[in-house]
Image (tube, rainbow, N blue to C red):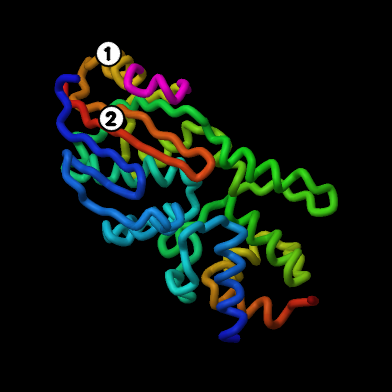
Amino acid sequence: MKDLVLELKKEIIEVLNFEGMTPEDIDENAPLFGDGLGLDSIDALELIVLMEKKYGIKLADPNQGREIFASITTMAAYIKEHRTK
Amino acid sequence: MHNVQRAITIRNHQVILQGELLFQRDQSTPNARFFSELYKELKLTYPKFFKMDPLAKLGFLAAELLLNSLSAEEKEEMKILLACSHSSIESDTMFQNTISDESNYYPSPSLFVYTLPNIVIGEIAIRHRIYGENGLYLTPPNNKKSIIETLHKQIKWEDNRYALIGYLDYYKNKYEVDFYLIHS
């Protein structure tokens, strides 16, 4: 799980173009949206694509996103359970 | 140029505020690291900064240092008039790269939002809650001094008391910013 959290941080830094940010700068338990990492709806699209392309997870129900994308930790837990690649 | 209350220049990895060297890094430091180290030096907590393209980061950091002495009320109706030379070409190129390979076609939304140069004004306005009018002009690099004077002359003061004017540019890893806080 620890490896997956670190991998996710690196992936998010890359897909969201967080240039100059390091994995250590991200608190895996902080909220991804609003406060914390400060992501917005455009970033949510990037995360949905990341889930599908990298882990083979297609989110059919948009309401799921609220819980899955609460933090890096919640994302990692969901990926661990549902990944197909 | 009259009524200049504060001035900031950032180029060659040196930050000069009011004529005094405030922060510097070795020339070999990559630009992204220079920007993030300046961000950390200023003890800012604004994660959105890291998502910005280089042009927006440059303007954001300069504005941060220039405007930190003003109250929220003083900033509210401020005008922002800026100029640049190479527009958002860096982000345009990065976005183009996301759609040029048919086998890996993915028009990245997070890159697309920075494919307009005036986004830098939006980022500054959001950060400081500035609601005054604004404009961004494109000008040849050799016209920098003249455009700043032109921007200064364009300010119509009406009720507002402050204006942020200046020039910034980012192209092929070269950058510069000269911002001025003008008081009516």
**Chain of residue at mark 2:** B
The three-letter amino acid code for the residue at tag 2 is: Leu
**Chain of residue at mark 1:** B
The residue shown at (38%, 38%) is B176
The picture quadrant where one finds residue A64 is bottom right
The residue shown at (57%, 76%) is A74
Image quarter (top left, top right, bottom left or bottom right) of the N terminus of chain B: top left
Image quarter (top left, top right, bottom left or bottom right) of the C terminus of chain B: top left
- Total tally of numbered discs in the picture: 2
Q: Badge 1 local density, few (<14 within 10 Å), some, or many (20+)?
A: few
Residue B125 seen in the figure: no
Is residue A36 placed above or below B50 in the rendered structure? below
The three-letter amino acid code for the residue at tag 1 is: Lys
Residue underneath mark 2:
B164
Magenta stretch bounds: B138-146
The residue shown at (36%, 45%) is B12
Q: Magenta region's main secondary structure?
A: helix
Is residue B176 placed above or below B142 in the rendered structure? below
Q: Considering depth in this image, is A79 or B7 the residue closer to the camera?
A: B7
For the residues marked 2 and 1, what is the alpha-carbon distance in whole angstroms?
13 Å
Q: Is residue A11 magenta?
A: no
Is residue A66 placed above or below B156 in the rendered structure? below
Q: Residue furthest right?
A: B103
Rendered location of residue B24, percent (x, y): 28, 54
Q: Is residue B145 magenta?
A: yes
